Amino acid sequence: GPGLPCIIKSRLTMGSPYKMYNTYKRVLHICPLIALGIISFVSITTIKCTLMWWPPVLYGFVPSDYRSYGGAINLLVFLTLTSCTVLFFLKAMFIGPGHVPSSWHPIDSFCVREYIHHDLPLLTSNFNCNGINITDTLQFCEICKHYKAPRSHHCRKCNSCILKMDHHCPWINNCVGHFNHACFTLFLYFATIASFYASVIMTCSLYQAINADWYMYFGNPYQPFVYFDITEFIVCILALALAIGVIISVGAQCILQLKSIVKNRTGIEDWIIEKAKYRRQRINKCEKYDFIPEFVHPYNLGFWKNLSEVFTLSCQPLSDGIVWNVKEGCSQFSLTLEQVLQKEEKHRRTREYVVIKKYSGSKFPVSFGFNTCLRPPCTDDPRIPLDVGDSIKVTRSKDYWLYGQKVSELNSCKGWFPRSCAVPKVEFSSKKIS
């Protein structure tokens, strides 16, 4: 909205969240090393196949009749695709998503209502609209000890609030967010194309190697001859399998990221919008509340504008990650206000449980039954160890697991624990009295 950049400012110098990270810390991790190992293995095998299947003009280890400019172009195309894959992989890893600056705090304004008047119909009748200010529409991060800027979320792995966080990717050992979204998507794109190109080369090479006898006696004498010993044959089969796996898995992720970009909506925001729809449906069925209109995603500016928000020649996005271009009729706080209201509802639904059986924090607690072990929550959220008598504020549940926050003066950790190790506090109190 107009005038918002002068409202959303930091009381401290914000600095640039677009910064490089420690090289060794990012690379020397099992997932990036595996990713680089797969890229290297497939690339070296493909180059080996290319030099036999279609030798380039300057390759001196085969007769000149077999060499061609087409082979040189073929090799150059593959090397270009591989180089782009590695380049954008490293850029996505080292540039990082950008972090909300420490101690960031928006300046409150007496005219805030002017900027959120489009959002006031979203509020339920029990929400106090008098004297509302910007901080009422933002979430506060208890870990980082500052407000979360619009579209930012806290990452447990990175231990900081990430600008426009999409997800934490173990393969780059970093979050995918505002400043590295373009580089990450380009990495996925070039990895898929390079793997497809490599799989074509290796398939053709394997076909000729399997039919080597026929090509030797009946083939074109001017056609290069492909021959593998047993070790080379096995290596080529493994490399081809890895390339096909990359095409399927990385290609699917690339499609998801492109859909996210053209909608200008992260994976986390998809979940928020789904909950917003459910919240409105439930409230609109209740007669004591006023009708709430359908939630409008404020950052969807249209196909081309959404693309230009992320993809630029420098791969640096247009926004600073704090102030965003929004759809007409929406404000900078449309989404953050919805998040605040959803969190308020979640707190109202919270139920307190008391632990009656000790839990060590194991992912496979055999002592709580086979169903508990075989049907764990499919998330990367941690398990929290519990002692008898601990109090837990539960906000989510599965068939055999509960998710909540331990009520403690020393620490306040969140995570999953077996349902059978705790009972509701009311039920616990009743048993104690009886």
Image (cartoon, grey):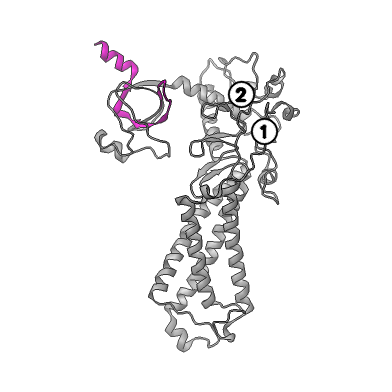
Name the mark nearer the viewer: 1 or 2. Answer: 1
Reading the chain from its start, which is encountered first: label 1 or label 2? 1
Residue at point 74% right, 27% down? 6
Question: Residue 56's image quarter?
Answer: bottom right
Which residue in the protein does label 1 denote?
14
**Magenta stretch holds residue 427:** yes
Which residue in the protein does label 2 denote?
137
Look at the picture and state if 290 lies above or below 56.
above
Q: Which residue sits furthest top?
A: 433
Residue 212 appears in the rendering: yes
Residue 122 location (% of width, % of height)? 60, 23
Residue 314 location (% of width, % of height)? 69, 50
Helix or strand or loop: what does disc 1 sit on? loop
Residue 200 location (% of width, % of height)? 52, 68
Under mark 2, the amino acid is: Thr
Q: Are marks 1 and 2 in contact (CB under 8 Å)?
A: no
Residue 173 location (% of width, % of height)? 51, 47
Helix or strand or loop: what does disc 2 sit on? helix
Closer to us: 78 or 411:
411
Q: Is residue 46 left or right of residue 329?
A: left
Give, as a single range, the part of the protein colored magenta: 405-434
